[in-house]
Amino acid sequence: MEQIRILVVGTVLILSPAFAQTDSVSTLRYEPTWDSLDTRPIPAWFNEAKFGIFVVWGPYSVPAWKDRGYAEWYGWNMRQENSPTWKFHRRVYGEDFRYEQFAERFKAELWDPDQWADLFVRAGAKYVVTTANYHDGFCLYPSQFDATTETDQWNSTEVGPMRDILGELNEAGRKCGLKMGIYYSLYEWFHPLWLTDRQRYVTEKFHPQFKEVVTRYKPPVIFLDGEWEMDYTAWKSEELCAWLFNDSPVADYVAVNDRWGKCRGQHGSFYESEYGGGTGWRDHPWQEDRGIGHSYGYNRNETVDDYDSRQELIRMLSRVAGNGGNFLLDVGPTADGRIPVIMQERLVQIGQWLKINGEAIYGSSGSPFWPRRFPWGTCTCKPGKIFVHLWDSKLQEVCLPGLKNKVNSCTVLTDQGAKLLAFTQTDRWTTIALPNQLWLDDAVAIIVLDITGSPDVDITIPQDPDGTISLTAIEAQIHGSSPRYEAGKKDQIGYWDNPADSVSWTFHLDREGIFDMLVTYSCASGAGGSEFEFAIGEHKIRGRTQETGAWDRHRTDTIGRISLSGSGKCVMTVKPITPPKWNSMGLRSVRLLPHK
């Protein structure tokens, strides 16, 4: 191993930007260009609501089957020869049974919209998103524009339930104080115009039907989807979004996502994360959507082991809120109109937790310690308060780095009321003692710090009390255009194609000493052998990538030993070395461990 000695160097603090929001956005008119449309602030209600329910329901709820994954894609999958769904369909329904015939069996005979709305309120949800129409084109309301190649009776008022599902559910939800939104699919698998003339489909079907459903039901939130077959210019999305923001009946309070046509994460009131792990975007409003199991529509093939537990769902809500997003949790009803009991139980359990801990979720902002992540949980905040979310009930203490505000008191929320906790505060750390964990919630327990002023945190990465320095991918500053953070299972800096690009971290050294440097990374087959260099000041340590087999498979190498002296801020930079040719790496973390 190489051992070098360096002195501490200084750096600057970089803060993440905030996004604009307002209660009403109706005073301006927007041009049909993203440059103009993207200046519209998001209505304040959306970020305050935090938790919503997604309802995916239609003819696909009759077969309700997928080997694993999205059962609502049944109509597409049954046509894919020799696929598991194709085989299932032929065995159970016969090869001559058409998808349109499922609508005749979609009766909703046990459906009670008031019971659903009451359940959603008990869950603690503030808004609901219901499928106006899915990719199969079936409308849950009377539409002038519904059709397939097989039928022109393709909505819930003309076949199946013979009811305006969307209208009745919206009325029930609004009576309970819920904001009632819609999901709308841009494309349809079986629409005659989609299959023959996509330009006419956009102008004669998509635009007028979208305006029809928005004008009739006035949704405050719209979840667009099914846009990936064409870009936004082909969909004429800027023109339609300008109508939505300027002239629609919801212009002053609607929030719409980013699925306008191959522009996800670029344009929209909020960005959509689908089964994304709760990481999201820090500099733009966003929403995490997912099912309780692996499907949105009801899947009879799922077992109890496929459903997330109370603990997993509450922790996802906590994680999303800590990252500044909203959580849209899906339920997939059965064809007769029931929400499966296991889903009902999960919703009620979330609601019971929110009844005690909702102050830490509703109207909160994301963690003031971002991009710092904690192994024990996350944080949310409001002016004068920081909410510490604990996911580990066995902790004995919690250490928060860089908090500049004075802490006046520290309490934990429980179903018996608030309990005072002991804490200490220094210039670098606020430490909370947790002497007895028996009364903490095993999913997420909330500790409330009452502070003076709005949260003010020095986000320089601190040295842990045991001397370890942990530098993670999400905390890295990226220099150049190619590297980017990959969330979820990968949790790494990937797509690092340009050897001129680099990443860096700024950390604070409190305890000097000799440290072993450990690098965790991924490297797919055929991409190994590239050199990389870590530098602190004028001193450098080099390593070489070894193949891990895939970009989501990681290994940890100890690449050297380094001696740090003094105290203060340090900058560590990592960059490729060429030659040899740089083949990229998926950099997850760097750790400096005190050498023993």
Image (tube, rainbow, N blue to C red):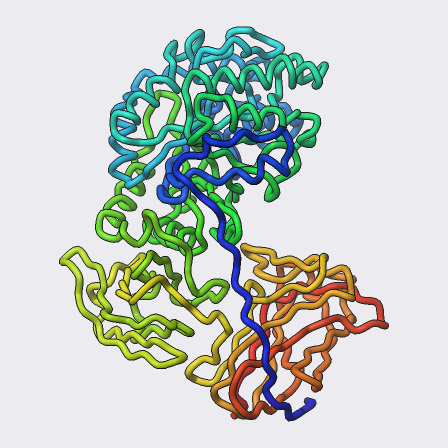
Instruction: Name the outermost residue toward the front.
Output: 27
Above or below residue 92? Residue 506 is below
Give the image quarter of residue 378: bottom left
Q: Position of residue 419 (x, y in %)?
A: 17, 66
The residue shown at (50%, 63%) is 371
Instruction: Name the outermost residue toward the left.
Output: 416
Q: Is residue 86 visible?
A: no
In the foreground, 61 or 17:
17
The residue shown at (63%, 77%) is 572
In the foreground, 134 or 374:
374
Q: Position of residue 482 (x, y in %)?
A: 72, 57
Q: Position of residue 590 (x, y in %)?
A: 59, 74
Above or below residue 379? Residue 79 is above
Q: Position of residue 474 (x, y in %)?
A: 55, 63
Which quarter of the image is occupied by the N terminus?
bottom right
Q: Is residue 527 visible?
A: yes
In the foreground, 300 or 412:
412
Say left or right for 235 vs 359.
right
The residue shown at (34%, 76%) is 430
Say left or right for 20 vs 77.
left
Say left or right for 412 vs 496.
left
Say left or right for 125 vs 306.
left
